[in-house]
Image (cartoon, rainbow, N blue to C red):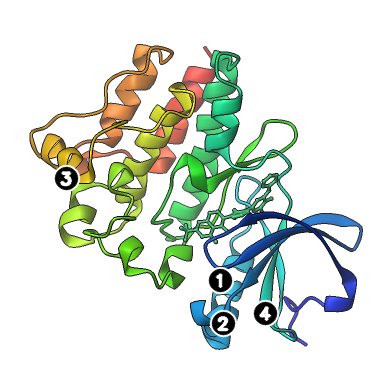
Amino acid sequence: TDKWEIDPEELDLGQEIGSGQFGLVLEGKWNDRKVAVKMVREDCMTDEDFKEEAMVMMRLSHCKLVQLYGVCTQRSPMCLVFEYMESGCLSAYLREKKGRLSQDLMLGMCLDVSEGMAYLESSNFIHRDLAARNCLVTKNNEVKVSDFGMTRFVLDDQYTSSQGSKFPVKWSAPEVIKYSKFSSKSDIWAFGVLMWEIYNEGRLPYENRTNAEVVESLNAGLRLLKPRLAPNAVYSLMEWCWKEKPEDRPSFAVLLHELAALSDL
Ligand SMILES: Cn1cc(-c2ccnc(-n3ncc4cc(C(C)(C)C)cc(F)c4c3=O)c2CO)cc(Nc2ccncn2)c1=O
């Protein structure tokens, strides 16, 4: 069998930990390792798509990306076996820790994500839906990037179309909203919003505004305001990520360097 094929006999399935985008996600055990197992409903992607995707994701390996260990295609539904992230998704984690997030912890989280994203950027891989809800947290408060590139398999056009009700407009760069032009520079825009989420303790950006109102305010040159907890130097980096023209935004490599310099102060 292919090297990314996991023998279902080695997999013990446990409790449900969420109903992901493509079906159930269970916690489990594989070779004495705690894992998260994502069952993939057939209507979401063909076997071939699934295997192709798995091969791509297996090759993307970095300590700040949630690692895919392998796939089970010999059973139905097929499943993806991931490293287990004890503290769940970052957005929920930030809201739970509201009022108790130190400056070092918040800057450390931004650094973790920028490291994972700088690796994806160097691998010419675009995330397409970077946000705190799509990052996960380990038991020792380390943050890793999750579900990169998975938007390509979502069939719900409410999510995939930029006019759809589920499209992540509040994290989308202007060129994505207007022309669906995704790039690492549109990922950096989303990263600026993710930094805003971290320093706002998991609040929703543009809280009670509709997607249409957000588009209008962006076109008027308005941007998210500085979170109370964010130092001016960090907010300047957020504003840099939100430059209208993609080429005026930083790369993740540059942004990582700037964040690392701040954390050495
Ligand atoms: C690896 N992993 C995944 C999850 C987990 C559970 C349910 N849904 C999801 N999600 N969440 C979001 C998500 C988003 C997408 C987009 C295509 C980008 C829209 C595609 C997905 F496939 C998922 C998915 O599967 C995840 C994220 O993939 C939870 C873990 N851990 C815990 C631990 C405690 N409590 C909760 N979760 C964990 O370790």
Q: CA distance from mark 3 to mark 1?
A: 35 Å
Q: Residue at x 27, y 21 (%)?
A: 225
Q: Nearer the viewer, residue 118 or 77?
A: 77
Q: CA distance from mark 2 to mark 4?
A: 7 Å
Q: CA distance from mark 3 to mark 2?
A: 34 Å
Tell whether label 3 touches label 4 (CB within 8 Å).
Answer: no
Tell whether 65 sits left or right of 259.
right
Q: Residues within 10 Å of mark 2 (few under 14, many from 20)?
A: some
Tell whether 136 sits left or right of 155.
right
Tell whether label 4 touches label 1 (CB within 8 Å).
Answer: no
Tell whether 240 sits left or right of 13.
left
User: In terms of sequence position, does the residue under pointer 2 or pointer 4 come before the other?
Assistant: 2
Give the labeled residue for mark 1: 56
User: In terms of sequence position, does the residue under pointer 4 or pointer 3 come before the other?
Assistant: 4
Q: Is mark 1 within 8 Å of ligand 1?
A: no
Q: Quarter containing ligand 1?
A: bottom right
Is any part of residue 246 visible from this angle?
no
The residue positioned farthest toward the left in the image shown? 220
Give the mark toward the camera: 3 or 1: 3
Q: Residue at x 55, y 87 (%)?
A: 48
Give the labeled residue for mark 2: 42
Q: Secondary structure at mark 4?
A: loop
Give the labeled residue for mark 3: 212
